[in-house]
Amino acid sequence: GSISNLCGILVAHYKQYPEIKTKGMTALPCIVLFVSEQVSIKSTAIFGSGIDNVIEVKCDERGKMIPAELEKNILQAKKKIYCQNDSVFFITRATPFCICATAGSTVYGAFDPLPDIADTCEKHKLWMHVGAAWGGGLLLSRNCSYKLMLTGAVLSPRANSVTWNPHKLMGVPLQYSAILIQEKGLPDACNQMQAEYLSHQINSTMLTLTLGIKLFSVADVLIYSSYG
């Protein structure tokens, strides 16, 4: 799940700031992302944007992100000024770029109000990433009460990227995770590299972060065949 979240946020960076692939984080403004206070995003420390630039949004008593608090945090972030270099007094405003919603949090099993969050993303033109590592499997249930809510945000153009861990609700004995990107070709544009010493091009991280190709999808086929 963490690796899939990393890939989702990486693609979100590239979508809004394609120069990051060649010039790195120094070419970007001070970008911030928003998450539920019930989750942690380790990806920010890995790819260099910094955990100080992650804004935690308050949740209700059931662990669900509060849309009004999200809107307030976005407006506050846009007004916030960061001093990046005290020696030259260079300042820059924070630039929101992504909201990470959750479909099945680790502690509460909470589902954020995904349609409301999607509305906010469209209003402010932000990338919407849904961490459905646990809850994504509920889409396979015909009677799940959250199915319509999930379908309305996750399986539509409203969600830009989705993390799903099939092993968490499907009884798959092998741990693995999937990252689903709405825009076709974007993961390849973000991650594709070339190396002369390889017999093939380094394709996207839609396979794995390593160069090995692991047929995780076979596990899904076997589970579906067995349980229906």
Image (tube, rainbow, N blue to C red):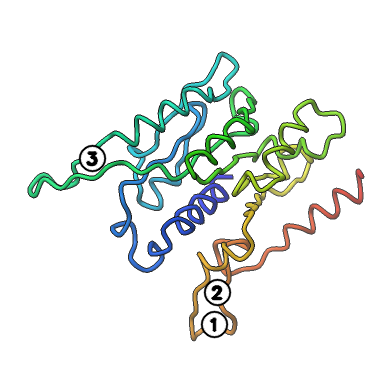
Give the CA separation, mark 1 to mark 2: 8 Å
Q: Disc 3 residue type?
A: Tyr
For image coordinates 35% across by 51% down, the residue present is: 48
What whole-number distance in Å separates the C-alpha atoms at marks 3 and 1?
Answer: 43 Å
Relative side of 133 to 147, left or right: left
**Residue 86 image offset from top left, x and y in percent:** 11, 44
Disc 1: which residue: 198
Q: Could you tell me residue 140's position as x and y percent?
A: 82, 40
In the image, residue 145 lies at what x, y percent?
79, 25
Residue at 84%, 55% (x, y): give it: 221
> Number of callouts in the render?
3
Quadrant of the drawing holding the C terminus? top right
Q: Name the residue carrying label 2.
A: 202
Tell me the kind of residue under disc 2. Ile
Q: Which residue is tagged 3?
A: 82
Closer to the chain start, of discs 3 and 1, is 3
User: Which of 7 and 199 lies nearest the eye of the viewer?
Assistant: 7
Relative vertical location of residue 141 with respect to residue 14 in this rendering, above or below: above
